Image (cartoon, rainbow, N blue to C red):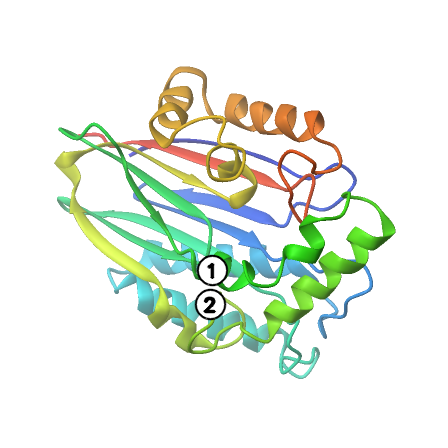
Amino acid sequence: MRATFATEAVPGRPNEDFVGATPDAIVLLDGAGTPPGSESGCVHGVAWYARSLGSTLLAGLAQDGKPLTEILAEGIKAVASLHDFVCDLTHPGSPSATVVMLRRTADTLDFLVLADSVLILDVIGTAEPMVICDDREAQVGAAHRTAMDALAAGSPGHVSAHRAYVETLRDHRNRDGGFWVAAVDPLAAEQALTGTVPADRVRAAALLSDGASRLVDRFALATWRQALDLLNDSGPEELIRRVREAEHADPVGERWPRGKIFDDATVACFSVLP
């Protein structure tokens, strides 16, 4: 596989996304940020968690051909052990992250998607790409975001409503009927969306954190096909530039209500070589 990627943090904050690759695999994580005024029980923070888990997963992918769910479960357990007895892993705000994993093995591509980052596969012979996204968090969140979305972003009321929204969603995290993310429970790996496709049927692939996918799934300024074409023609930096342009054009969330006016944005692109 040939890979290119780009990542850009929210100005003035550490990047809580992670992206990394081996010759045959890539991992993208989007850490779930902690709003101002909320506690997490962890002294390390979300960026540390995303980097620790991401690097652990890359090491697992490079070593053997285990199922992706098994690699993820072992990675979650290993990172939990790094801060157990130091941090309160029972805290409902303990750091967490979305996970996308893509691996080429012989003649196939294996994928795993947990939570709301996006995997796009450009499948030969189809007009529209194959889009894999775990939208359970969005489904749960839709019932709780009305108050937040009605307020101007950046206002004291919006900041308070966003904190309340995030803390409410914690009650649904990693529970049946809720949504699942990588945090401290390795059983979350079993809830990931997984699949295998023939490598010779995939022209290209893209992995996007939700800060990058918002160009399509929140702002509706491009289709998934147009996003793939943009990545092919201009690269991941241009997609992120367009996301930032849209965010700056709507500084209080009037056109596109959202919890975060700006978000870390990460994109990885692959072409599949014969």
Q: Are marks 1 and 2 in contact (CB under 8 Å)?
A: yes
Residues 134 and 82: in front is 134
Q: Which mark is residue 173?
A: none
**In the depicted structure, whether residue 236 falls above or below residue 55:** above
The three-letter code of the residue at mark 2 reads: Phe
Q: Residue at x 70, y 30 (%)?
A: 250
Which residue does the numbered mark 1 point to in the structure image? 139
**In the depicted structure, whether residue 213 falls above or below residue 149:** above
Q: Position of residue 198 (x, y in %)?
A: 13, 43
**In the depicted structure, whether residue 174 falls above or below residue 62:** below
Alpha-carbon neighbours of circle 1 within 10 Å: few (<14), some, or many (≥20)? few
**In the depicted structure, whether residue 129 falls above or below residue 61:** above
In which quadrant is the N terminus drawn? Answer: top left
Residues 130 and 10: in front is 130
Q: Residue at x 42, y 20 (%)?
A: 230
The three-letter code of the residue at mark 1 reads: Gln
- Indicate the quadrant where residue 241 lies: top right
- Report helix, strand or loop for mark 2: loop
Q: Residue at x 57, y 23 (%)?
A: 242
Side of 35 where 108 appears, left or right:
left
Which residue does the numbered mark 2 point to in the structure image? 179
Side of 38 where 230 appears, left or right:
left
